[in-house]
Amino acid sequence: MSKGLYDIPSWATIETRTLAKLAGVERLFEPQYMALQAGVEKGENLVVAAPTGSGKTFIALVAIVNSLARAGGRAFYLVPLKSVAYEKYTSFSILERMGLKLKISVGDFREGPPEAPVVIATYEKFDSLLRVSPSLARDVSVLIVDEIHSVSDPKRGPILESIVSRMLASAGEAQIVGLSATVPNAGEIAEWIGGKIVESSWRPVPLREYVFKEYKLYSPTGDLREVPRVYGLYDLDLAAEAIEDGGQALVFTYSRRRAVTLAKRAAKRLGRRLSSREARGYSAEASRAEGAPRSVAEELASLIAAGVAYHHAGLPPSLRRTVEEAFRAGAVKVVYSTPTLAAGVNLPARRVVIDSYYRYEAGFREPIRVAEYKQMAGRAGRPGLDEFGEAIIVAERLDRPEDLISGYIRAPPERVESRLAGLRGLRHFILGIVAPEGEVSIGSIEKVSGLTLYSLQRGLPRETIARAIEDLSLWGLVEVKGRRIAATSLGREVAAVYLDPESVPVFREEARHLSFDNEFDILYLISTMPDMVRLPATRREEERLLEAILDASPRMLSSVDWLGPEEMAAVKTAVVLKLWIDEASEDTIYGEWGVHTGDLLNMVSTAEWIASGLSRIAPYLGLNSKVSNTLSVIARRIKHGVKPELLQLVEIPGVGRVRARILFEAGYRSIEDLATARAEDLIRLPLIGPSTARQILEFLGRADEAREAQAREMLARKGLLSYLEGDAVAGEEGE
DNA sequence: ACGTTTTTTATCTAGACAGCATGTC
DNA sequence: CTAGATAAAAAACGT
């Protein structure tokens, strides 16, 4: 099996060799060898276009290690997802062993500008860092851009494109290494970053692709094979076949509900065969999961016990992790997943089934792109465990297998196309150039614009740039002074809080007829902001939503005559946010509005960010300080999900919305009340045990007392325990 | 007339980055 | 627009 494997060349640097040794790399995969030949070690810019699992990450590490040794400076490794950032962070510990400190820098884990030589960050976080300190660009000696082909993503692509272009424009000599999926115009991306191209279709585990129709598997090679029909349900029969052969199956569906129902059915039919001690272990972990409605946790736990699971973004992070771990450990044999698992964390399976190649967009269903198919198919085959991986795309009734073979299996993925020229993207791009510098000439904007992928593919979008500048100027974010453009203080603030520039006119317009004394109106305002994630409202909910408006804001009912789907979604979002800050439980919110924990958390953290962002912007819009204060209180309430009276208690470490309410009802309504509280009384409260009580007391500067109280309590419990272990009758002392 | 079963019709459909300062149940 | 599962409403059925 030495096919496609190369010795580490004799001329490789000592850094590369050390890295290889630490990483346990003895021989090189084809793309890795090609990258060395292309000069990654010497600081050559590079685009590596190769399948997942072909060792692209190692190439990036080679670039980092050599660049830092040669030129000093710092390395940034940019990834599209936070989950990937965490994954890289743990797997890059070998860098620490080479004396390179490692930091992770993503939105939900902040600690000022990261100072370590190697930083893993999301695209947006790096963008934001560059806005705060533009000099950072000159310190960077290597920039790794993971999934660089995502410049063609309509939403986040422009952000990535603007980072890379600004880095290209900065005087520094940073090495840029782009890691890409295989795309037809990888050469063009290489040309954009002024680098060489390394292209390879080498993969560690060979991939076999099929179309499934009427229980037959059609291969592009012309082979045709019947699938044993045991259960009469194709997802089960396909999964069972892979499991029979010692593998695991990953089934991609395009709806959460379908993922859940298929998983339940699978557990029912396969459960007896797949159940194992290990699976029951993970099951127990799932049922203990925090922050999930009990019904969800229990349901998933029972599936996991049967060796089956589902996975989608509505699950709280803890449950997602449990499912991923259980699958990786082999305790769960089949996972039904929405596209959450297609990107992001590395979870390969022997067999990948694409249950439907359609998805819904704007009310219509349309076939997924080839690139999306390739991404899912690429998950097939676990290196070191499977001799091959299988990707199976399920045909619909009227499909001809050969059409799917030519349309997906043989088809090349779509070209990478810049999306920068949208107004939204360009405004963000331009503000990102102007704000950090304070003032800039039209010429320097054109210089950076000339270094974009868009400019390479289509030429300078002069008119759109002009319109974007006009917008920014009209909204008061920049001032145009002849050939120069200056950021206003409002513009700098907007860039710093990282809100979409369009937030300003939206906010300004709403603020005109908003009194800021109605909570619902404020929450609705937040829900209409461009950055907000809105909860889609179903038609069945519309009536209830209108009732809710009538209840919460008669003003709104009279000022708006018609509510479209977007407005309805904003209303639903506001309604749920209102429940949240009125301390409704997650179960209640899930029960009344069907909002899953994962979506709730997502929505809450976004809303908190926007609310606090607006409170920082408000002073620049000539709004009185009351508005700013109101927004900042709302932001804190959203963050913790509490009524105003709990805001003080919730600042205590270990005390969240639930415990704060318990303390409050027990008469501890403020920090002062707690300052004189007896440790024993706190410990006796429900959900507040000795360790939480200790945390509370420590926060109040009563650390000694806290330690003593905890020790006493532990001793007492031990005593009780030995008492119980004797032949005495159990006491009724609960927690 | 009313409860139950069957048929027809309506409805619904994925994901996830960012500020700031530190920790939920 | 090219679907398919399921919930809700309507119709048919039976006592």
Image: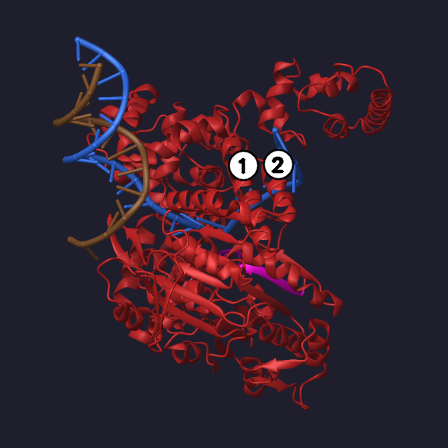
Chain colours: A red, B blue, C brown
Furthest toward the bottom, the residue is A10
Is A488 on the left or on the right of A173, as rendered? left
Q: Is residue A127 magenta?
A: yes
Residue A3 appears at what percent x and percent y? 56, 85
CB under 8 Å between callouts 2 and 1? yes
The residue carrying pointer 1 sits among few (fewer than 14), some (14 to 19) or many (20 or more) residues within 10 Å by Cα, namely: many
Which stretch did the figure color magenta? Answer: A117-128
Q: Residue A229, located in which quarter of the rendered image?
A: bottom left
Three-letter amino acid code of the residue under disc 1: Ala
Of labels 2 and 1, earlier in sequence is 2
Q: In front: A684, or A64?
A: A684
Q: Residue A46: in sight, yes or no?
A: yes
Residue behind mark 1: A297
Residue A158 appears at what percent x and percent y? 39, 62
Residue behind mark 2: A288
Q: Residue A396, located in which quarter of the rendered image?
A: bottom left
